[in-house]
Image (cartoon, rainbow, N blue to C red):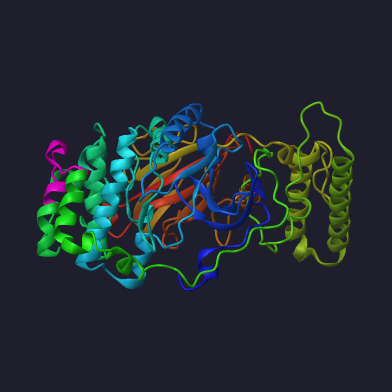
Amino acid sequence: MSGTRDVFQPLRALDPQVVGGYRLVARLGAGGMGRVYLAYTRGGRPVAVKVVRPELADDPGFQRRFAREIKAAQRVRGVYTAEVIDADVHGEPPWLATSYVPGPSLSQAVARHGPLSVPAVLWLMAGMAEALRAIHAEGIVHRDLKPSNVLLSVDGPRVIDFGIATAADATAYTVTGQAVGTPAYMAPEQASGGEVTGAADVFSLAQTAAFAALGEPLYGEGQGVDVLYRIVHSEPDLSSLPESLRPLFARCLSADPADRATPDEVLDWCRGRLGPDADGGGAPAVWRRFSEQDVELPPPLPDPTPVGTRLQPQPWTRAQPVPQAQPPRFPFGLPVPPAGAEPTTTAKRGRRTALISAVALAGIAALLALVAPPFMDLVRQSVHQVAARSSDSTGTEVLGAGEGAAGSPSSSASSRNPKPQPYPAVYLDAKTSANLDDPTVKVVDGTGELRFGCETAGCELESDTLVFRQMVNFRDITLDDCRSAVKGRKDHRLFLAGTADGSEICVKSASGDIGLLVIGIKATAVPEAGFVQADMTIWRGAA
């Protein structure tokens, strides 16, 4: 990373300002479990605060698994792991804080600097093996060891997210009935849904190290199902690896878990090949190439809230950036009083401000209705967002300009905020369709509401009853965003030529359900074998 702006992103208006008493300073990124922020302890130590995704937190069994894995992870004290410092499994939402590692991930380092040298690969494998020793000693199986979960600090690699993937993956597994992980780095037994032990982590260690040595996954790239098939049914091609490394990789990548090297054996093998450098301090010179000493951490914000203060949850919605040092302005982030409690003076003032802001927008909308009709859709959307957030924060409905009058459909819609229901890894191909009542149930005759096809000039999503709208230049799409996007739409077909992994599509059913489809894998290069796999969130009766 070339500078601070590449590493640290400013907080957005709807990001929480404090989580578990830690004053958040900047965004660090996002992963399978949720968003990651930079924060500081009260003593000034930088930490990475990970906030769990709402759909995981809402799963009945997640908190139990999360608590078990966090308790075990807090006992891990490996030199090459990122220490779990603090956590609240019952927070709203749940979160954990780990030590902050100043350095790029292995995937970022390879993208910027190219493949690692043989000595660097040996140091990398030794560090990962020592991390796995510490992790396995506490009864934890990482399950998702991959280049993005290995950070390169100036004094060596750090393995992160150990154990946490177990809780998150178990949640997704109970919903989809499928093994969850990163296909290119899975062990065969994990890919086929078998028993996963520490030996699977050794297989992933070798795959991760092979990526470092080659600059690409050992089993090739392509559709996830094709990669998994190669992992399960074929021997790895080691011919492109440096010859001196092949014996160790052959052991680690054995199809039989019992035949694989242990972390101790990997560590001893690497130290033997490194020779005098293993005890002579040669590692720092290797990692200095990847360190980010030119990146300056943003300073802590003043007057942090004391650790232990629990905040009300903040909605994860689309927002515009605000200056980092200023708190978000109305209507974002207003505290919600406990049920039955008398509002405080501040809460009353916030309620009055909410009403005044919405009424002012309503007046502007009425004026523009006379002089500038082309701008009405934008104004209505703003009024509805203020009304919805005012209702959420104060319990008071605020009506918009010309819409939302008593008894009107939009008034009813703005007050309905059903609980989102997550459906990970929805799979669609020419013969497999789905229905919105449960998208994870495969309809094999192709008669479901949501269908995939490549019979025309390009692949597409199609339906007889659903309407589609692809969301472009949106971030953190909300239910209100999708409501607005699909309102009045009649598009029962969405061509996929303009979509990519991560593209987001709003969907509405004839019965009033609204969904957000996030494409995970789009495979359309060979139309005859094309498919789409996507995560879906549905709000029932939300239209």
Task: Please state if 357 lies on the left or on the right of 419 as rendered.
Answer: right
Up-down relation of residue 113 to residue 422 (above or below): below
Q: Position of residue 502 (x, y in %)?
A: 45, 55
> Along the line of sight, which residue is nearer the eye, 238 or 457?
238
Residue 308 visible to the viewer: yes
Task: Please state if 151 lies on the left or on the right of 220 as rendered.
Answer: right
> Along the line of sight, which residue is nearer the eye, 8 or 515?
8
Q: Position of residue 65 (x, y in %)?
A: 44, 30
Which quarter of the image is occupied by the N terminus?
Answer: bottom left
Q: Position of residue 177 (x, y in %)?
A: 35, 32
Residue 230 visible to the viewer: no
Up-down relation of residue 432 to residue 300 (above or below): above
Q: Which residues are magenta?
A: 250-263
Q: Residue at x 27, y 58 (%)?
A: 124
As for residue 252 lying within the magenta part, the answer is: yes
Count of numbered circles on the image: 0
Q: Residue at x 40, y 51 (%)?
A: 520
Up-down relation of residue 90 to residue 496 (above or below): above
> Along the line of sight, which residue is nearer the eye, 143 or 374?
143
Task: Please state if 334 lies on the left or on the right of 163 as rendered.
Answer: right
Q: Residue at x 51, y 69 (%)?
A: 295
As for residue 526 lying within the magenta part, the answer is: no
Which quarter of the image is occupied by the C terminus?
Answer: top right
Q: Position of residue 425 (x, y in %)?
A: 40, 42
